[in-house]
Each structure stands twice: as structure tokens, then as C-alpha cells.
């Protein structure tokens, strides 16, 4: 297999070529405003190494922070019609009710609430009001809304009402983009619905971005299918990513962690990714980042869906350094390091300058930082180490020492010894771990459901079967599927031995999916 | 008599304080808070009436939401449903309620009387029947007082209504009403047995809404000014810091419909090298320091985030969290032999004698 992995970050677009499991080329290009330019530049650099002419490329896998940035910066968002199936329940808390007002004004195109939804045990809560859905669809069309988010009570347990409503909207409002909250998983109507609304707000941007990626691939003369990497370290075919862009929100940090796992050969470890401005710290379990099973705020909106459990701190190679009192970050020169750092002739003291003076990295002009004495350097590096140490401990789920993989362009800030860490591992190509993580990504399927009156093992087996079917539907090769996560939580107060089971399986991209274009 | 108006800011504080008084359980007040923000934005206002102002023959409604928190996350709290439970009780008994009080000030149920009061334009009575959160119907001051457990109205958002008119005991009330609740879909808004002004004055736990607002306000002020929120709480409540440290382990299991388990903490600062273990049944029940039980129900054991001061629940506590454990004094009604029989350590299956953190 030959795959290209690309990470479109805020500063750099990194690209690697992986052949038969080995990284054979790694390049960096500045990220362009239109995204495409940076990718074209990266392709051009890869080509310049000639490796691309060695044969067919099986897949291009791209990870990007583009969608997250759009929400945070409130740019390129589409107006959304919100349709909730659950009346008469929840009426006093309609869709958008807890959004930051300025974001709601930008995204809300109208709210429709009709009868429907289910109980926790699968009984219908109310029969679906099909006529009401049809009426809503017509009103949305009259308002010119082309993106619709549907949510229904307990739809992760029974998606039939959301699916039926989506079909009605497709009839009445052909061509509208429809997001069903059941595709986003978790229990918690408001948070799941919020994820759906954000997803629907990204409908146009997702369309345009994926089209730009495809154009960049074609423009480079490649004939390879495009996959987009997701929050959980797996990939989706381009068509699915276009439909569910929120699943790509945190793919940058996730890809670094997955890349770190791959390059080190470790499946269970802490990963510290030190970039130019921030450091992401997360934990790998079975080779995947541990998911956050809690509310995650995105652009001020409470959501609950598949996101990695990460801590980000304001520490990076470009972080400003000040003495008395000693302070590193959160301000950073970012990509301007090569102009503004002291070792590069600039005037801002940065963490990189300290590392250059200490001989940890050989970039810039070391004589320009020769005035930084040993004691000061040691203080700064110790402080950086302390910041990382504290976050590593906060990310842990259990006591005990763990191995730690240091990746990213600023990995030199990670000291050799850390409290709670058994050993620090540095890997070749660690500065492109994010692109490596994209290149090796697999396909997943997940189930999060409440089961009643089943023995624990039977409930888990049933959930695993459902998850496997979903993975195959998403493009995985069934023969390669592995369960990477199983969690069961008994539920207090519900009768009949109820438990909530979450199972996630992953597998390699199926050859058939690769051939399909 | 002029009643104090509860401000929008008070309600924000109430949500934070009630979550702390939930002693690990009671469910998050978040959705109730969202409802109240919307009601206030629409112009509704709620007034607070001290229990001592009640006339002996006034009637008071006691309300709570019953059911599985998980269902509440899908069928979101609707402020009108709890008001309907109260209206149904008025229609059933013919009483006109002077005000509405909470069954349980700890957690999400603290907001229920405010929602009913906003719709029905009655005051909230500044009292409850637990002074915290507890898992069962007989763990209340009115059950300790052997007051009548019935009737009880249960309402579902679809318009279903059921009344439990006669049961001989609180245990029976728990059994029968729980069945109705399950059929509704494991969530019901309930109005408990009406109480007279005399009963509320004698058996109610007074001023707990005010207490929750004070505690929450202290925490929010400390957050704003970057002061120690734990010290801020102790400045408004005669509590004690039991421990500071870090969560090193959590074990959970569900038995008989309750979330049971324990968390192990490792100490920091003055508590370095000293281990704490806290056992829970929905709420924090007994805290052990190096194997010695040092705090137990009915003393309130609150586990708080040491930086934000906000409560950490038994469902969500996890490894690595930095916590402060504090004890707050219990309502005196639970310190009598009868009170301890209902909510002392033996009521939760611990064969230990109650000893208060606050005993001289």
C-alpha cells in the first residue's frame, strides 16, 4: 500500500508518503488561505523527491482544522433549519436555546418542533407527526433553507423517526443537506442536537473544502481516492466527511497521537505534541486517543459526540519567555519564529531560543543567544517540563508510570525525565507525526446504546455486532475489524437491569472502497 | 408582608450552591437553570417567602422530579410540567397553595419549585425536606416526623396524570409511585403530600434556598476574583475542610437501582501521605481517613473541584481531579435517634455509630 497523509494545520501543511508501512518522504509547506494552495505545494514537494513516480498511490488521507476554525471564527457558516421530533416534551428548551447569541443569530434559520421520538426502552414516545414534518419542510423551502438538522428524543436508540423525517424533507426540499442527530451518537438531546446544528452549519463549507481537496489531488495528476481523517483517529470516505464535517473537528491533535503510536510501535502511552504555539497532551489506549465522554464546548456551544480527551496548554517552540517572574507562553510568535526569534535576528525571546542556546536543537544562529546563561536556561526548561508534567498527570486515568512519546516540531521542550513517566520516547519523523497519523488511519464503527434485560456479555456482543456493521458500511474490510473500546455502565434508577454499552471497532480501509471513486 | 424577589443572578448562584448541597447526587441543575433563564427573559419573576411567615392553616405544595437522570437528558425538563403537578393536586384536594417548596434542595430538584412558582405566580417557600440530596422517599424530615405520605400527584409531559391517593407508609409510597414513574418512561413530575403551614414550620428544613444561593454566590464571587472558593464557602457556612488531594481511583457498581461505589484520594499539602476513601450510594455517605470513619450521613460530605469550587458528582468523578472535601452541618431533625434511623450510617448498611464532624 502506498498512501499520502496530509495534515493541514493553522501554520504548516505537512505531508508524508508511506510505502509498505515505512515513511519514505516527509515535506512541509506553509498553509495557504484557500487550503488548496498549501496542499498543491506539498504535493509538488513530494513529487520533487520523485517517489511519487514509483507507482500507484492507493489513497490520500487529509486531516484539517478547517471546520473547527470556521466555528470558532464564525466564518463560512450556513443558515440552518432546526427540526426537533419530541413534542410535547422539551418544548421549553428549543434548539439553539443555550448558544452564544451572536452565533445563534448567524446560524438559526428557524425552529420547528413536532411530535415524535422514543422512550429509553424503545417504545415510541409519540407517533411521528409526518404531516407536521412535511409542513415544516415546506416552510423551510419557502425560507430558502438548504441545510436542515433533525433531532429526536432517544434517536441513538431508535433512529427511525429521524430517518423518516429526513425522507420527507428530501421529497419536499430536494437537494437540501440533512443532518440526523442519530449519526452523531450520544445520549443527551441538547448536546447531540447542538452537534447536529453545528454540522448542518458547516454544510456548504464541507462541500467546498472537500471539493478543493479533490481538485488538489486531480490538479497534481494523482488518481487516488480521498479520505478525510476524523476525531477518533480513523478516516471517512470523502462523501461521508462532506456529510458529517463535525467528525473532523479535532483530527489534527488526534493524527499526531496516532502517528506517535505508529512511529513508536506503542499502543498504550501518553503523547505530547509540542507545536509552535500550543502543546496537546493525550493518552493512547489500544493505539487510539481516549475519547472524552463529557461535554466539550466548541465555539461556546455544548456538544457531546466523538471527541478525543485532550489537554491543550499554551506552550510551544514559539512561546514568549519572560523572567522575573518566570513565564513561558501563552503568547507565541507562531510561524514568525524564523523572523522574530532572537536566534534568527529578531527581538522576542522564545522557548526555541533557550533550546538553541542549550544546544538542544541546531537551528538559527547560536551565537545570538550565547548571552543566555546556564542557570536561566535551566530554569526555563525546568518550567516547561513542569507544565508538561502537570498536564500529563491530569490526562491520566490511573496512577502509575507510563511511557511518553514526544512529537511535534517543539518536542525538544520535553525533558528526558518526568514525574509519572517511565521513559520519554522520541521517534524519527516525529515532527510530521500528524501527517503520518493521517496516512495510517483506519475505518471505525461505534455504538452507544442502552440495553435491557440482557446479561452483560450478551449486551456487549450485540453492541459489537452493530458496531461492526457500521464500520463495514463506512468502508472497512470486515476481516480486519478489531474491537478497540468496550465500556458498559449500569444505569441507576432504570428498571430491568439496564446498561449503557459503548463499543468501537476499527479495521483497514477495504480494497473495494479504495477502488470506488 | 413584602417578599424578596429572587434575581436572575440568585438563580445562577442557586444552581451552583444546590449542586454542592447535592453531596455528589441529585442530578445537575443545568436544564432547570436554562428553563429559569428563559422564564426570566420572558418577564417571569419569582418571590421567596420565609417559612416562618406561613400561617398554621396555609397549605404548601412540595415538588420534585422523579426518575432516571439519563431520561432527563433526552426528555428535557419542561418548566410547565411541574406546575401541572401542583395544579392537579389543587384540583384533587381543593386546597389553594400559599406557596411551593422543594422536596430536595440538593441538585436539580432545587429549581423545580421556582419553575412551578413562575407559572402559577406563587412564592417559593424558603425550605425543603432534606437539606441536601438523598436517594429515597423516606429519607426526609417529614418522614422522620411521621407526617402523612399521601396523596401524591404524578404528571407526564404528554398529559398523563396519576394520583396515589392512599398508602400506609413512605415505603409504600416509594414502591407505588416508582411503578407509575417507570410506566411514564422513567420520568415524572410530582407534587408530594400537601403540608400545612404548621407542619412546614415544625418539620421543614428552613432557609435552604437562601443557603444554596449564599454558597453558590460565594463560589461564583471567588471565581470572578480568583480567590480560594473553598475558603469562600466556609466564610458563609460553618463547615470544615476534611481533606485536600487528588482522586486516585473510582469504583462504581449499580445495585437495586442505586449507583454505589467508592473513590480513593491521595493527600496533598497538610494531608500528604494520608489516604481518604469516600463511599457513595448516589450521594457521598461515609468518608474514611486512613481507615477511620471521620464523616458520615447525615453530615453533608461535599467533594469540590479545588480550583473552581464547583461540586463533583459521584457519576462523574474521575482519576486525577484535584479536590477539596468539606463537611457541612446537617439539619438538626436528622440528629435525633429517629432521624438517624432514617438517614444515619445504618440506614445505608454501615454498622457504625454516627459521630458528627461537628461534635464538640
Image (cartoon, coloured by chain):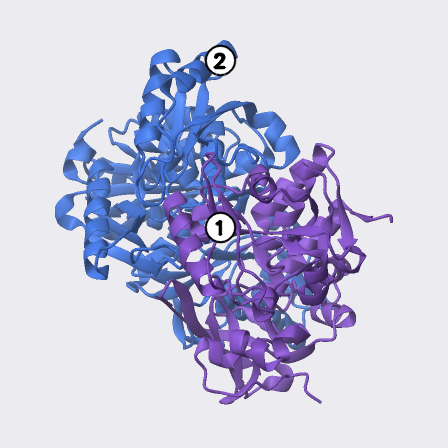
Chain colours: A blue, B purple
Q: In which chain is the residue bearing label 2?
A: A
The extreme left residue here reads A479
Q: Nearer the viewer, residue A217 or A338?
A: A217
Q: Is residue A289 found left or right of B214 in the rendered image?
A: left
Q: Which residue lies under the disc numbered 2?
A: A139
Look at 36% across and 49% down and name the residue there. Answer: A232
Q: Which residue lies under the disc numbered 1?
A: B165
Look at 26% across and 32% down and name the residue there. Answer: A225
In this view, the mark in front (2 or 1): 1
Count residues near mark 2 (Cα–Cα under 10 Å), then give few for <14, some for 14-19, many for 20+: some
Residue B219 in sight: yes
Q: Secondary structure at mark 2?
A: helix
Compared to residue A127, the image places residue B129 above or below, namely below
Q: Nearer the viewer, residue A223 or A98?
A: A98
Q: How far across and down, in percent of the image, does residue A470 sit? A: 24, 41
Q: Is residue B232 found left or right of A8 in the rendered image?
A: right
Q: How far across and down, in percent of the image, does residue B266 sit? A: 52, 80
Amino acid at each position: 500500500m502506498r498512501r499520502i497523509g496530509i495534515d493541514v494545520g493553522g501554520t504548516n501543511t505537512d505531508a508524508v508518503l508511506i510505502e509498505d508501512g515505512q515513511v519514505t518522504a516527509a515535506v512541509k509547506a506553509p498553509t495557504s488561505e484557500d487550503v488548496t494552495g498549501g496542499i498543491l505545494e506539498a504535493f509538488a514537494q513530494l513529487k520533487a523527491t520523485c517517489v511519487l513516480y514509483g507507482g500507484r498511490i492507493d489513497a490520500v488521507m487529509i486531516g484539517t482544522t478547517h471546520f473547527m476554525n470556521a466555528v470558532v471564527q464564525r466564518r463560512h457558516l450556513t443558515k440552518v433549519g432546526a427540526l426537533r421530533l419530541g413534542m410535547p416534551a422539551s418544548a421549553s428548551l428549543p434548539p439553539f436555546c443555550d448558544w452564544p447569541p451572536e452565533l445563534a443569530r448567524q446560524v438559526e434559520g428557524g425552529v420547528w418542533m413536532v411530535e415524535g421520538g422514543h422512550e429509553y426502552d424503545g417504545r415510541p414516545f409519540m407517533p411521528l407527526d409526518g404531516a407536521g414534518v412535511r409542513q415544516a419542510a415546506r416552510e423551510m423551502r419557502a425560507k430558502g433553507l438548504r441545510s436542515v438538522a433533525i433531532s429526536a428524543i432517544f434517536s441513538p436508540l431508535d433512529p427511525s423517526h429521524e430517518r423518516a423525517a429526513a425522507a420527507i424533507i428530501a421529497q419536499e426540499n430536494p437537494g437540501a443537506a440533512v443532518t440526523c442527530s442519530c449519526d452523531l451518537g450520544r445520549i443527551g438531546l441538547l448536546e447531540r442536537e447542538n452537534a447536529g446544528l453545528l454540522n448542518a452549519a458547516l454544510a456548504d463549507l464541507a462541500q467546498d473544502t472537500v471539493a478543493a481537496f479533490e481538485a488538489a489531488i486531480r490538479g497534481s495528476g494523482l488518481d487516488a481516492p480521498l479520505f478525510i481523517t476524523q476525531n477518533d483517529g480513523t478516516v471517512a470516505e470523502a462523501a461521508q466527511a462532506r456529510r458529517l464535517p463535525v467528525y473532523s473537528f479535532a483530527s489534527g491533535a488526534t493524527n499526531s497521537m496516532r502517528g506517535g503510536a505508529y512511529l513508536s510501535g506503542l499502543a498504550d502511552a501518553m503523547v505530547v505534541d509540542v507545536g509552535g504555539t500550543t502543546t496537546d497532551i493525550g493518552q493512547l489506549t489500544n493505539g487510539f486517543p481516549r475519547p472524552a465522554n463529557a461535554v466539550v464546548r466548541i465555539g461556546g456551544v455544548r456538544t457531546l459526540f466523538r471527541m478525543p480527551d485532550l489537554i491543550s496548554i499554551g506552550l510551544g517552540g514559539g512561546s514568549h519567555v519572560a523572567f522575573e517572574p518566570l513565564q513561558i507562553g501563552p503568547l507565541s510568535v507562531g510561524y514568525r519564529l524564523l523572523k522574530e526569534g532572537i536566534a534568527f535576528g529578531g527581538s522576542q525571546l522564545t522557548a526555541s531560543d533557550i533550546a538553541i542556546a542549550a544546544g538542544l536543537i541546531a537551528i538559527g544562529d547560536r551565537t545570538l543567544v550565547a548571552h543566555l546563561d546556564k542557570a536561566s536556561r535551566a530554569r526555563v526548561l525546568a518550567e516547561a517540563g513542569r507544565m508538561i508534567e502537570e498536564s500529563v498527570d491530569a490526562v491520566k486515568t490511573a496512577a502509575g508510570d507510563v511511557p511518553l512519546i514526544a512529537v511535534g516540531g517543539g518536542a525538544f521542550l520535553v525533558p528526558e525525565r518526568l514525574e509519572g513517566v517511565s521513559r520519554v520516547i522520541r521517534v524519527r519523523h516525529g515532527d510530521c507525526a500528524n501527517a503520518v497519523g493521517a496516512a495510517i488511519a483506519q475505518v471505525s464503527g461505534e455504538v452507544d446504546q442502552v440495553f435491557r434485560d440482557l446479561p452483560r456479555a450478551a449486551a456487549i456482543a450485540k453492541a459489537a455486532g452493530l458496531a461492526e456493521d457500521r464500520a463495514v458500511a463506512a468502508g472497512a474490510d470486515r476481516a480486519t475489524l478489531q474491537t478497540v473500546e468496550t465500556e458498559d455502565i449500569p444505569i441507576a434508577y432504570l428498571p430491568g437491569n439496564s446498561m449503557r454499552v459503548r463499543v468501537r471497532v476499527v479495521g483497514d480501509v477495504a480494497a473495494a472502497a479504495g477502488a470506488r471513486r | 408582608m413584602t417578599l424578596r424577589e429572587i434575581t436572575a443572578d440568585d438563580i445562577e448562584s442557586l444552581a451552583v450552591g444546590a449542586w454542592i448541597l447535592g453531596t455528589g447526587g441529585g442530578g445537575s441543575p443545568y436544564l432547570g437553570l436554562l428553563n429559569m433563564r428563559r422564564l426570566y427573559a420572558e418577564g417571569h419573576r419569582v418571590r421567596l417567602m420565609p417559612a416562618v411567615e406561613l400561617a398554621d392553616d396555609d397549605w404548601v405544595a412540595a415538588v420534585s422530579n422523579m426518575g432516571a437522570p439519563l431520561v432527563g437528558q433526552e426528555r428535557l425538563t419542561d418548566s410547565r410540567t411541574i406546575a401541572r403537578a401542583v395544579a392537579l393536586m389543587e384540583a384533587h384536594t381543593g386546597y389553594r397553595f400559599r406557596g411551593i417548596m422543594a422536596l430536595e434542595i440538593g441538585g436539580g430538584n432545587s429549581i423545580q419549585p421556582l419553575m412551578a412558582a413562575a407559572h402559577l405566580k406563587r412564592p417559593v417557600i424558603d425550605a425543603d425536606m432534606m437539606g441536601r440530596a438523598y436517594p429515597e422517599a423516606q429519607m426526609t424530615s417529614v418522614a422522620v416526623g411521621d407526617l402523612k405520605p399521601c396523596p401524591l400527584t404524578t404528571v407526564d409531559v404528554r398529559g398523563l396524570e396519576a394520583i396515589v391517593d392512599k398508602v400506609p407508609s413512605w415505603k409504600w409510597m416509594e414502591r407505588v409511585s416508582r411503578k407509575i414513574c417507570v410506566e411514564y418512561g422513567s420520568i415524572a413530575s410530582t407534587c408530594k403530600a400537601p403540608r400545612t403551614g404548621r407542619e412546614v414550620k415544625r418539620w421543614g428544613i428552613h432557609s435552604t434556598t437562601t443557603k444554596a444561593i449564599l454558597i453558590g454566590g460565594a463560589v461564583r464571587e471567588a471565581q470572578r476574583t480568583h480567590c480560594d472558593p473553598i475558603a469562600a464557602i466556609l466564610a458563609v457556612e460553618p463547615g470544615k475542610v476534611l481533606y485536600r488531594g487528588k482522586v486516585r481511583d473510582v469504583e462504581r457498581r449499580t445495585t437495586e437501582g442505586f449507583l454505589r461505589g467508592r473513590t480513593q484520594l491521595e493527600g496533598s499539602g497538610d494531608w500528604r501521605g494520608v489516604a481518604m476513601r469516600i463511599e457513595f450510594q448516589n450521594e457521598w455517605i461515609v468518608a474514611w481517613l486512613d481507615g477511620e470513619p471521620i464523616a458520615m450521613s447525615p453530615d453533608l460530605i461535599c467533594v469540590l473541584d479545588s480550583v473552581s469550587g464547583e461540586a463533583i458528582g459521584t457519576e462523574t468523578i474521575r482519576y486525577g481531579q484535584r479536590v477539596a472535601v468539606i463537611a457541612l452541618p446537617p439539619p438538626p431533625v436528622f440528629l435525633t435517634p429517629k432521624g438517624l434511623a432514617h438517614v444515619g450510617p445504618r440506614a445505608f448498611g454501615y454498622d457504625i455509630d454516627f459521630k458528627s464532624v461537628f461534635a464538640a
